[in-house]
């Protein structure tokens, strides 16, 4: 078996608990309950193992990672190990006291998610009354402490018209970076795809808004823009390639090549409770399943782009074709590309299925 270079980033999903209920949440449909969450000592050991393996950055995520009282302890430990620490949060649990604890622990950066700029729109998606005000307050507290701030907006057909205002808000709040990310259709997003899918015209308008804002704000605001796969004809290099740059650990300790990988059938999911992170990264069947190019079918196998997009997304291939080893049907060269085109223009009826424990 060949040696895999170490992952650059660890996504530590500390908990699936969250006060919000976004219908595009990247968490799996089968959410981990509190009772199955790893203990503080387990996470401290995982951080040690990550640093030894060569990981450079830890993204503390969830659910809402601030729902765990041990978050400052974990941040402090990661900082001592010289890991760059990033908190991905909804911000609704940020106040002077909780932020001070994280700042003192050495937190390097915060990614603060917003559901919308419009309060009613934000509450319709997140399902939490008063959340918008709490988030705005959180952004101001973060800025006042001088912690580098990124704003995240997930966009979809209900809020995509407000991308210009989202960019303005990020600038006005003093964020150094903003991410405008069209919804990705896995897990909860896939369940709600018909209601979230933007039209081609909406996508074009949002792209135009980003181009204009980049010209207007220049270096004062970095803008990351993630387009929806379904209106494309070439897939993205999902996670920079399976088992190449990222490792994801779930609240209960499962180690995954990406947050949606729990959908892959007929594989054993390795767990840090029984194996070291290094052994899992190098040798586990899961991480070697789609690593590199040997697994690829045609047309990827003989394609000049196979080491550019790595055949696209395995979880998307599974969700759309029923076969995780198929060419991602986003690719125009896939003989199943029509599935993507049909889904991108399907009707938009129904009600949101909100992300909640026991919703399904
Ligand atoms: S996407 Fe929404 S529901 Fe999911 S973790 Fe983030 S804030 Fe919570
Ligand atoms: S055929 Fe495969 S490698 Fe080539 S562009 Fe399509 S998905 Fe990428």
Image (cartoon, rainbow, N blue to C red):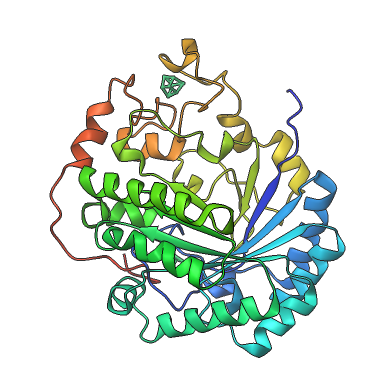
Q: Please report the residue visible at 46 percent of the width from the left and 31 percent of the height from the top.
A: 312
Pick the quarter of the image with the C terminus: bottom left
Q: Please report the residue visible at 22 percent of the width from the left and 57 percent of the height from the top.
A: 195
Q: Could you say which quadrant of the image residue 230 lies in? A: top left
Direction from residue 250 to residue 17 in the image, left or right: left
The x, y position of residue 222, in whole percent, is 55, 54
Pick the quarter of the image with the N terminus: top right
Viewer-proximal residue among 259 and 92:
92
Direction from residue 218 to residue 120 in the image, left or right: left
Res 213 seen here: yes
The x, y position of residue 234, in whole percent, is 39, 28
Q: Please report the residue visible at 58 percent of the width from the left and 78 percent of the height from the top.
A: 67
Q: Residue at the bottom extreme?
A: 97
Is 133 located above or below residue 153 in the figure?
A: below
The x, y position of residue 84, in whole percent, is 75, 58
Q: Please report the residue visible at 69 percent of the width from the left and 79 percent of the height from the top.
A: 145
The x, y position of residue 342, in whole percent, is 18, 36
Q: Residue at the front extreme?
A: 216
Viewer-proximal residue among 312 and 243:
312
Viewer-proximal residue among 228 and 346:
228
Viewer-proximal residue among 197 and 249:
197
């Amino acid at each position: 078996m060949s040696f895999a270079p170490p992952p650059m980033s660890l996504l530590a999903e500390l908990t699936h608990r969250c006060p919000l209920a976004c219908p595009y949440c990247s968490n799996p449909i089968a959410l981990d309950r509190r009772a199955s969450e790893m203990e503080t000592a387990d996470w401290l050991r995982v951080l040690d193992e990550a640093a030894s393996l060569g990981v450079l950055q830890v993204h503390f995520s969830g659910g809402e990672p601030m729902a765990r009282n041990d978050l400052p302890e974990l941040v402090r430990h990661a900082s001592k190990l010289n890991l760059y620490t990033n908190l991905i949060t909804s911000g609704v649990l940020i106040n002077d006291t909780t932020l001070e604890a994280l700042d003192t622990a050495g937190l390097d950066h915060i990614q603060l998610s917003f559901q919308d700029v419009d309060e009613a729109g934000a509450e319709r998606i997140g399902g939490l009354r008063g959340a918008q005000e709490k988030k705005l307050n959180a952004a101001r507290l973060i800025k006042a402490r001088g912690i580098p701030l990124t704003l995240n907006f997930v966009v979809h057909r209900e809020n995509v018209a407000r991308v210009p205002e989202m960019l303005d808000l990020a600038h006005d709040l003093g964020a150094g970076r903003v991410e405008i990310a069209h919804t990705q259709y896995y897990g909860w997003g896939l369940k709600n795809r018909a209601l979230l899918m933007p039209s081609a015209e909406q996508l074009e308008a949002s792209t135009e808004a980003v181009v204009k804002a980049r010209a207007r704000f220049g270096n004062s605001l970095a803008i990351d823009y993630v387009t929806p796969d379904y209106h494309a004809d070439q897939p993205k290099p999902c996670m920079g390639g399976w088992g190449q740059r990222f490792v994801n650990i779930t609240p209960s300790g499962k180690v995954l090549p990406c947050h949606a990988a729990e959908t892959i059938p007929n594989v054993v999911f390795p767990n840090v409770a029984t194996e070291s992170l290094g052994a899992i990264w190098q040798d586990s069947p899961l991480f070697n399943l789609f690593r590199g190019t040997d697994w690829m079918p045609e047309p990827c196998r003989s394609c000049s782009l196979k080491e550019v997009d790595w055949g696209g997304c395995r979880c998307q291939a599974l969700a759309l074709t029923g076969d995780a080893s198929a060419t991602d049907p986003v690719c125009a060269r896939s003989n199943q590309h029509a599935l993507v085109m049909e889904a991108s223009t399907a009707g938009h009826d129904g009600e949101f299925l909100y992300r909640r424990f026991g919703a399904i």
